[in-house]
Amino acid sequence: MFRRVAATARTVSPQSYVGEGWNSFISKVLDNAIVGFCLSEGLMSRSKERRKENAAIIRAIHKLAVQMGREDLRGDELIKWAQKELPGMDLPPRS
């Protein structure tokens, strides 16, 4: 990855995009370019992907709990209930 960023920096000459003041270092310009590329391609960090996956699992568990008459469960109580009622299920970590 570093070699690609260095090659890109040599090619596009980021110092030509640098002004004065805050956030104007060459490294910041490259960082912004990488972040912009990731956003434009819809790329997410693994932690964001994991949070989205965990949220989907929690919604599914909550839906199941509601179907079983436990609409009162939320958060840690929902996870504890799922651990008891659905042993062996791969659950997100408790908050």
Image: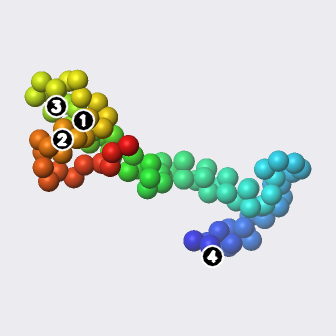
Say which residue label 4 marks: 3
Q: Nearer the viewer, residue 12 or 68?
A: 68
Query: At x 14% / y 43%, what residue is drawn?
Result: 84
Callout 1 touching callout 4 (CB < 8 Å): no
Callout 3 touching callout 2 (CB < 8 Å): yes
The x, y position of residue 12, in whole percent, is: 74, 64
Q: Earlier in the sequence, mark 4 or mark 2?
A: 4
Callout 1 touching callout 3 (CB < 8 Å): yes
Q: Amino acid at mark 3?
A: Ala
Query: At x 62% / y 57%, what residue is drawn?
Result: 34
Say which residue label 1 marks: 78
Say which residue label 3 marks: 65
The x, y position of residue 24, in whole percent, is: 81, 52
Q: Amino acid at mark 1?
A: Leu
The x, y position of residue 19, in whole percent, is: 87, 51
- Left or right of 27 on screen, residue 90: left
Q: Amino acid at mark 2?
A: Ala
